[in-house]
Image (cartoon, rainbow, N blue to C red):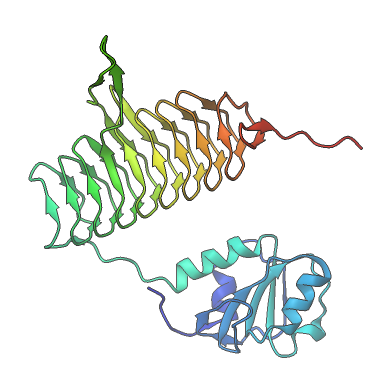
Amino acid sequence: MSVDHRLTVGDLVHSMRDVLRILGRSDRSVSRPSPIDQADSESLTFCTRHGETGARMVRDSRAGVIVCHDDLPLSPGDASDKTIILVPNPRLAFSRLVGKHFVKPVEPGVSPHAAVDQSATIHSSAYVGPNSSLGCCEIGENTVIYGNVIIYSGTVIGNNVIIHAGAVIGAEGMGFERNAEGELEKFPQIGGVLIEDDVEIGANAAIMRGAMGNTVIGRGTKVGHLCTVGHGVFIGRHCLITTHAKIGGSARIGDYSQVWMGASVRNGVTIGRRAVVGMGSAVTRDVGDGTTVVGVPAREVRAKAG
């Protein structure tokens, strides 16, 4: 979905925040974003390395415009064949530039190949892709639902949400209770799913509906590809749940927390605000605010003395 057009350094800087310094020509223009090791004179790129390593990458790159850290040991002589834009957070600045200038917005509308319940409410600015199936649900403004997504009845999705291909929203959680004979009897799953504004759900992720109340994904949270979020889970605002993470039923995750690749969170566990769960960890007990845990079972990481 990239857009190919020319932009001058002035165009780029005008739409940026926190530009501290520019080295090189301000009238240089670029036409596309590229990785730093594949860039040429037509390319806009970025460098996240610090110190002399970062400076060397910038000097060696053939890119026309490079966004990099403001503390790199660079001089005007390093910008004889390129323009260097120095900022506090180059990856963030670069992502904003690409999003603003090089990404074509998805056109709104419902694909004729989608199956949509007549009682569904879909805002006119939303997009629903081919082969998606929507029950009695609500879809907010500027929300994008790609193809082959299943959204069950009882789901409410806010504004500016992105749901990638193959995701399933609102399926029944696996709630069972054994009877006197040891047989499994289903616990009714009659709740819903609430996805707040600015959430992104990855491809083939599964978000289960609540058993009684709602499963909630808070504003600004990102749930990665192939993740599973169990019934009745509450995930706060601006959390990052990365690929293959599994969140057990009724778990709670506080605002601004991160759960890394392949981690598992036991049902009913509470993870505090601004906490971090390391890659592949198994969380079996509550995690406090601002705490980092790793391992199987997950344990708090403590800084080494001295």
- Residue at 28%, 21% (x, y): give it: 212
Q: Residue at x 31, y 30 (%)?
A: 174
Q: Is residue 199 left or right of residue 62?
A: left
Q: In this view, does 230 lie above or below 122?
A: above
Q: In which quarter of the image is the C terminus?
A: top right
Q: Residue furthest left?
A: 118
Q: Position of residue 221 (x, y in %)?
A: 46, 44
Near-viewer residue (51 or 152): 152
Q: Quadrant of residue 77?
A: bottom right
Given residues 215 and 127, the one toward you in this image is 215
Residue for point 57% across, 24% down: 285
Q: Can residue 247 be seen in this view?
A: yes
Q: Which residue lies furthest to the front in this view?
A: 181
Looking at the rendered image, the quarter that the N terminus falls into is bottom left
Q: Nearer the viewer, residue 294 or 141?
A: 294
Provide residue 133's location: percent of width, then percent of height: 17, 50
Residue 178 appears left or right of 113: right
Outermost residue to the top? 180
Give residue 84's quadrant in the image: bottom right
- Residue 144 percent coordinates (x, y): 30, 56
Residue 274, horizontal then vertical, whole percent? 60, 36
